[in-house]
Image: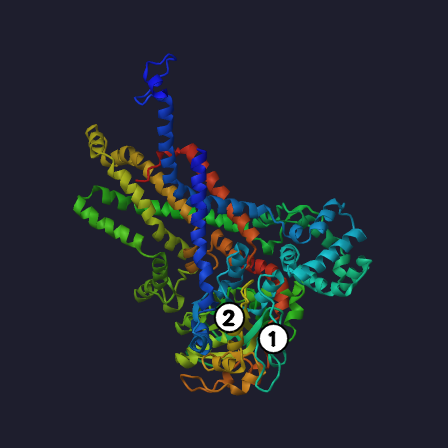
Amino acid sequence: MAQHESATPAADDVMRAADGKPLKDSLRRSMRRAKTKALLLVAPLGLFILFSFALPIADMVKRSFYSPEIQNVLPETAELLGDWDGDGLPPEQIYATFAKELAQADENRNVGVVSQRVNYVMPGARSLFSGTARKLGNVDSGPYKPAMIEIDEDWGDPEVWSILKREAYPITMAYYLSAVDLRYNAAGEIEAVASYMQIYQKLFWRTLWMSVLITVMTILLGFPVSYLLANLPVRTSNLLMILVLLPFWTSLLVRTSSWIVILQSEGVLNDVLVTFGIFSNDNRPQMIYNKIGTIVGMTHILLPFMILPLYSVMKGIPPSYLRAARSLGANPVVAFVRVYVPQTIPGIGAGSILVFILSIGYYITPALIGGSSGQLISNFIAYHMQQSLNWHLAAALGSILLFVVLGLYYIYNKLVGADALKLG
Amino acid sequence: MNHAFKTTAVAGVTAMGLLAAPAATFAAESLTIVSWGGAYEESQRKAYYEPYTEMTGTEITQVSKSANGLAGVRSQVEAGNVTWDVVDMLEGPAIRACDEGIIEPIDHDEILKPAPNGDSPSEDFIPELGECFVPEILYATLFAYNAEMFDGDNPSTVKDVWNTADYPGKRSLQKIPAGNLEWALMADGVDHEEVYDVLDSSDGVGRAFNSLNKIKGDVVWWSEGAQPPQLLADEEVSIATGYNGRFFNAQVVEDQPIEIMWDGQLFEVDGWVVPQGKLTDEVKQFLRFSTDTKRLADQAKYISYGPARHSSAPMVGKHKETGVEMSPHMPTNPENLKTAIPKDAVFWADKGDSLSERFNAWLAM
């Protein structure tokens, strides 16, 4: 019946498909199916990016300011400390709660989580906490204040308690401050750390200027190579292209180690220089395990990232433009500088941003051949991840690096425009 | 749209499940043991792993990641996916891991074998037994030199290391503050028994860094235990710090012109720890087997580290391959202990973070 009805010309002016269903509905259904299919096809990639990229970065940024160890292990103490005015020594109630929770933490074997957290801002806190926790077993009843001061006189020091109060709050700027060589002093004001402890500002600057220098070096070295590649007959240029690509495909470690062979003080280059009498045997120049090593190694390793986009842009520049410029009276140099070079800007831009962003976060090459003066900020992020295990500080350093790169990209976008990028 | 999200979610969960599944099924027939690589892990393979596999049929997967052992254990425990069964670790990081509760407490007298004469493990082990740590060896970090690089006298004391005029050539030191600060004070005239008293004050730390400043320009920094013997053999440096077993290997097994200087040897304990949730019967069996009197003495046939049991000492004999008498090469030999510094693990657990920060800043200056 229904079919018969819908087959007759509709009275309600709805467009209908051959099967009698409203055309709009059919269209929507088939569109939905196509959308679902498309979504499903993208889903693996989306999930991959979510789990391997977006979530870890979000977690890193969270770790850089969120540090709830004290709240997790000593929840009531953290709450009471939050309410306390922070003047002088805290009241007996806080001592009692702290003693109870610390003894509990000792039983659960997680005193170390808290003491390590405090140890970052107060060296020696680790043994203060674990020693106190162990001895608290012998204290059965209050008052706890004199009992704890008896165990260790540090518990009678107002500074210790004001540090605890500050660090008990889970959201903290302490790691960002450490990451730029600042700290809270006893009064809770921000001040610079002692000069012999300052390191990160210097490292950020070094990372920036060395990345800029490496980018400039790759432009200077890569431009002629790309120009040659783009203008030779195809047969020859393909052969030369392989010479660019082969090192690109070779393991990073192999390339870095080969620089050790070449540059070390008993190495190939030094032997040659000594043989030709440029340096005496006792006075071989140090060319590795310092900034020179890092700059040379990274320039070499990142060079293909400059050559490839430059080459693809140069390939697309019609030779007739240069000929036109010549026929209009420009000499070769003027034609090259005013007609050819401006057209390669998208390639230079793309190559520069690739090389710069890669080098600002570079790790392996400086670690292997940078010595101590050629280390970059990423080496210290790795150091805090693997050696000192101060993951919060590593996260703060990493977040600052991330924001600097995003900021620089924003500026680049305003100045040159991301549309002008050409990656090949 | 809703439908699409559900499908994605289901696909996602399935994918996660597939990734997680294989890790759980392995554990039974194999043990994953983490150690330091190089000549040291080789000695463990010969003395412990091979006989153990022969006896029980359990395959042992070797992972050479002890250099980042604490970071690895912590991240695995935090992620709830522990794949390491036993980890070779120094005493200092083990104290820290134990405080954080990420490694298992161990009842030494219940799990480990008594000595042949019946002494319980807590009596038989030389170092004091911590809560979570099974000592294996005592090893030393100390100075060694390439004897072919000095025309006159060879260096013999820590002061000679700082004397670059009479003993020319570069030095190689480990890129950590531990050890270097102690030796810097010894070179500055502090007695080997008093270094930690001096280091406990801020003035003392300043004095150590001032002393290090005097040779800073002549130092090549190393970070992997295999580097110092190589740097000495290549004549890149004339004096280097390093692990005594590695130097022994280069000197005796590889016949390099390397000599060890026992003055100021900094000795510490290395041993096994078990990550959280991994103290299974299989692991207990491995610990019991590998740390009995005979196995500990066996390991000393392959590398010159002192066994951590009193009862193993008389059983230490000759080097397996070269037939060299081992006892003069042991850090525990009384002759070698005269000016030794026992590394203060508690001091470094407390002050290590701030001293490392200062050391790094000093390096970057």
Q: Residue at x 37, y 33 (%)?
A: A35
Query: What type is the residue that disc 1 sits on?
Result: Glu
Callout 2 secondary element: helix
Dot 2 amino acid type? Glu
Q: Who comes first in sequence, dot 1 or dot 2?
A: 1
Where is residue A390? Give x, y as percent.
Answer: 57, 55
Q: Secondary structure at mark 1?
A: helix
**What's the distance in space between the residues labelled 1 and 2, CA to CA?**
15 Å
Residue A361 pos. (x, y %): 44, 49
How would you rate the neighbour count of disc 2 (Cα within 10 Å): few for under 14, some for 14-19, many for 20 or more?
Answer: some
Q: Position of residue A306 (x, y in %)?
A: 33, 45
Q: Would you name the residue on which mark 2 appears? A: B282
> Is residue B364 in sight in this rendering?
no
Going by the image, does A228 lie left or right of B109? left
Quadrant assignment for the C terminus of chain A: top left
Question: In the rendering, which numbered label is found on residue B110?
Answer: 1
Q: In the picture provided, is B300 more to the left or to the right than B106?
A: left
Q: Quadrant of residue B151?
A: bottom left
Judging depth in this view, the residue of A336 and A26 nearest the camera is A26
